[in-house]
Image: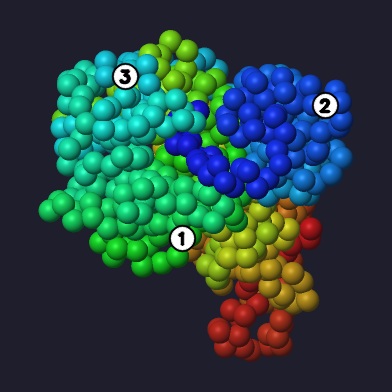
């Protein structure tokens, strides 16, 4: 029996119930966890008469449990093709089997054929993790230590308690009977002293939690509440309690420092696993096998008031939960760590990391990579900072070279574990109104200009994405009739960007243009040249810089510059003066970023297009003459 799921399929079925149902020899062996014998029996039965679909799936599961992935995937595919009896949990096993024995590209191709039936989050998670693991390159050099306290029995679910490490084990005890499905003792909680090097010494049964004849496991100690959370078998009158189907499940209990105990989550038909209490949000996280799960066991939380449950269980959703099993939630430094046997990992069960976002949602869970993860089952990850400002952590694994079925390993790190990613979130907003822009295209480009990721902003302009770490990225945003935003960042800049919301302002072309004298022109403040001068003064440059900014946002703009004078002075002089002024504006713009393709013409009209009656020989006040002195930057294209 695999301890990684903490007896997820914990079914203790009474003999009277078994007697009521007629089962084949293969069925009895399968439900008794004797998978090799079940395979042999099912194949003998199949030679005489075809197996029922549920028996075919049992045989596929038996092949899967014994590492015969070719045989398992063939049977899973057979059932998947013929009918819809296969659960999403077995669908995950089918993909796991295919992943172990075929090219991942074939798995990806299969996923595409089923994309309309699968959760969008599952497909995104798979695509991202495939990409991330492919980009990670060499294996991690993290040093892990197999703890001295490990035994030939299963040792798992480490938890911090002051200067000690708590853990669960199936090692033999006089006070506990053998649990038949595992062949080991009913689970109990042990403790050991944490040494400087991270190893654990002097392990012994943990006496602060009351004894139980049956399962007692996966502890978590809350420093803030000074209480223990752990799981234990449902009992009644000192004996195991069963539901109407003969099933014994696991409950979550809470123990106060003074020894008082109360059940928090208890249901004879539902098992609860791996409690974790987050003091910042007053949430109790756990894994459970509710019937409405996305796969096998899912992660949930309940709101509490100092540990007392105040809400119904809330599923963490398809961004976290998958067609596989998710267990062992643990939050550190704003990130949720958990374990999953979803098909796109390195092996059976891997450890993943997801950032907890401000709105309570989660980023794409990322595989923390080789070293801590392996091709075997890796689960029950915990981590904290020690007195030497190092990160010290523990997890369980059944990887080769261990002492038992599941062993506990320690590790030390200088920085947060996991494959490095670049996560960006923010908004695309209108520069004028500051409102969010919906359906704006947002892209991340590599140093070479390759599109790494493309998405579109939501109704409020928000966007978010995550990619494997790059040495440099360019962030772009644009939308039809809006300007282009583009900015490049090195690694140092990328680190800073992730710490805050990243807003990109786009100018709407319609906000920059107005109609004057029957023409579409750029919106500029009124400006004047000095009397009889064609020099661009400070007041003029302020307005011309708006032209430069507009063209930088809309590089394909084509403009026509036209200047006008009043009627004072001779007609020929005014014509020459206005042409000089247009040319001076053109020169300034070309020097400040515009190209010749942006300016198709610069014209000085002199007094040819007087706006009022102040023509030659007509007496007018100065303010009326001023109305004729103007410059227009016409938008031709």
Q: Is residue 532 above or below residue 180?
A: below
Q: Which residue is mark 3?
A: 150
The percent position of residue 485, horizontal first and vertical second, equals 60, 50
Q: For the residues carrying marks 3 and 2, which lies nearer the camera in this image? A: 2
The front one of 45 and 276 is 45
User: The C terminus appears in which quarter of the rendering?
Assistant: bottom right
The front one of 164 and 636 is 164
The percent position of residue 98, horizontal first and vertical second, equals 72, 26
Circle 2/circle 1 CB separation < 8 Å: no
Residue at coordinates 47% horizontally, 37% vertically from top-left? Answer: 7
Residue at coordinates 80% horizontally, 26% vertically from top-left? Answer: 45
Circle 3/circle 2 CB separation < 8 Å: no
Residue at coordinates 75% horizontally, 21% vertically from top-left? Answer: 71
Q: CA distance from mark 3 to mark 2?
A: 42 Å
Say whether residue 494 is left or right of residue 295.
left
The percent position of residue 217, horizontal first and vertical second, equals 34, 39
Q: Report which quarter residue 413 is drawn in.
A: top left
The front one of 333 and 97 is 97
Q: Report which quarter residue 512 is drawn in.
A: bottom right
Q: Which mark is residue 46?
A: 2
Find numbered disc 1 in the image and state the secondary structure of the residue it sits on.
Answer: loop
Mark before the other along the chain sequence, 3 or 1: 3
Say whether residue 537 is left or right of residue 64.
left
Q: Is residue 239 above or below residue 517?
A: above
């Amino acid at each position: 029996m695999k301890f990684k799921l903490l007896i997820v399929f914990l079914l203790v079925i009474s003999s009277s119930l078994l007697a009521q149902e007629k089962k084949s020899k293969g069925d009895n062996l399968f439900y008794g966890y004797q998978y090799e014998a079940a395979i042999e029996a099912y194949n003998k039965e199949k030679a005489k008469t075809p197996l029922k679909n549920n028996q075919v799936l049992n045989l596929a599961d038996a092949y899967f449990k014994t590492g015969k992935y070719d045989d398992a995937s063939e049977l899973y595919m057979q059932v998947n093709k013929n009918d819809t009896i296969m659960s999403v949990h077995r669908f995950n096993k089918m993909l796991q089997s295919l992943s172990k024995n075929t090219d991942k590209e074939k798995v990806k191709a299969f996923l595409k054929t089923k994309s309309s039936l699968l959760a969008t989050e599952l497909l995104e998670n798979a695509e991202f993790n495939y990409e991330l693991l492919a980009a990670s390159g060499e294996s991690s050099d993290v040093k892990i230590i197999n703890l001295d306290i490990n035994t030939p029995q299963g040792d798992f679910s480490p938890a911090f308690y002051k200067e000690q490490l708590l853990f669960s084990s199936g090692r033999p005890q006089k006070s506990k009977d053998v649990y038949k499905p595992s062949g080991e003792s009913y689970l109990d909680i042990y403790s050991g002293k944490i040494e400087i090097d991270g190893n654990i010494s002097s392990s012994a049964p943990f006496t602060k939690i009351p004894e139980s004849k049956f399962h007692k496991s996966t502890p978590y100690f809350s420093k803030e509440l000074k209480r223990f959370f752990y799981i234990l078998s449902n009992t009644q009158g000192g004996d195991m309690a069963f539901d109407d189907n003969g099933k014994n499940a696991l409950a979550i209990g809470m123990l106060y420092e003074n020894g008082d105990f109360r059940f928090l989550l208890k249901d004879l038909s539902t098992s609860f696993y791996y409690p974790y209490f987050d003091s910042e949000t007053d949430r109790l996280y756990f894994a459970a096998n509710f019937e409405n799960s996305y796969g096998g066991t899912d992660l949930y939380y309940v709101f509490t008031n100092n540990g007392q449950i105040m809400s119904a269980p809330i599923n963490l959703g398809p961004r976290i939960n998958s067609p596989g099993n998710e267990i062992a939630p643990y939050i550190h430094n704003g990130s949720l760590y958990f374990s999953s046997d979803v098909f796109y990992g390195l092996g059976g069960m891997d450890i993943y990391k997801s950032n907890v976002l401000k709105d309570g949602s989660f980023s794409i869970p990322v595989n923390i990579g080789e070293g801590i993860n392996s091709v075997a089952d890796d689960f029950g990850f915990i981590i904290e900072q020690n007195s030497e400002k190092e990160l010290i952590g523990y997890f369980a694994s059944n990887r080769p070279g261990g002492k038992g079925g599941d062993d506990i390993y320690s590790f030390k790190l200088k920085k947060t574990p996991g494959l490095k990613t670049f996560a960006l979130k923010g908004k695309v907003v209108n520069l004028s109104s500051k409102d969010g822009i919906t359906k704006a295209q947002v892209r991340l480009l590599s140093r070479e200009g390759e599109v790494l990721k493309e998405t579109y902003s939501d109704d409020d302009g928000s966007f978010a994405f995550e990619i494997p770490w790059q040495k440099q990225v360019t962030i772009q945003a644009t939308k039809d009739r809006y300007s282009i935003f583009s900015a490049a960042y090195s690694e140092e800049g990328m680190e800073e960007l992730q710490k805050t919301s990243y807003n990109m302002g786009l100018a709407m072309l319609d906000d920059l243009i107005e109609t004057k004298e029957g023409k579409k022109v750029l919106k500029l403040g009124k400006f004047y040249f000095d009397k009889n001068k064609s020099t661009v003064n400070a007041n003029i440059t302020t307005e011309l810089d708006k032209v430069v900014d507009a063209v930088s946002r809309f590089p394909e703009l084509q403009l026509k510059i036209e200047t006008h004078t009043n009627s004072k002075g001779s007609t020929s002089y005014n014509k020459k003066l206005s042409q000089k002024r247009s040319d001076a504006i053109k020169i300034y713009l070309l020097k400040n970023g515009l190209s010749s393709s942006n300016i198709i013409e610069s014209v000085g009209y002199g007094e040819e297009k007087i706006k009022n009656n102040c023509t030659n020989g007509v007496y007018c006040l100065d303010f009326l003459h001023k109305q004729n002195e103007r410059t227009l930057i016409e938008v031709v294209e």
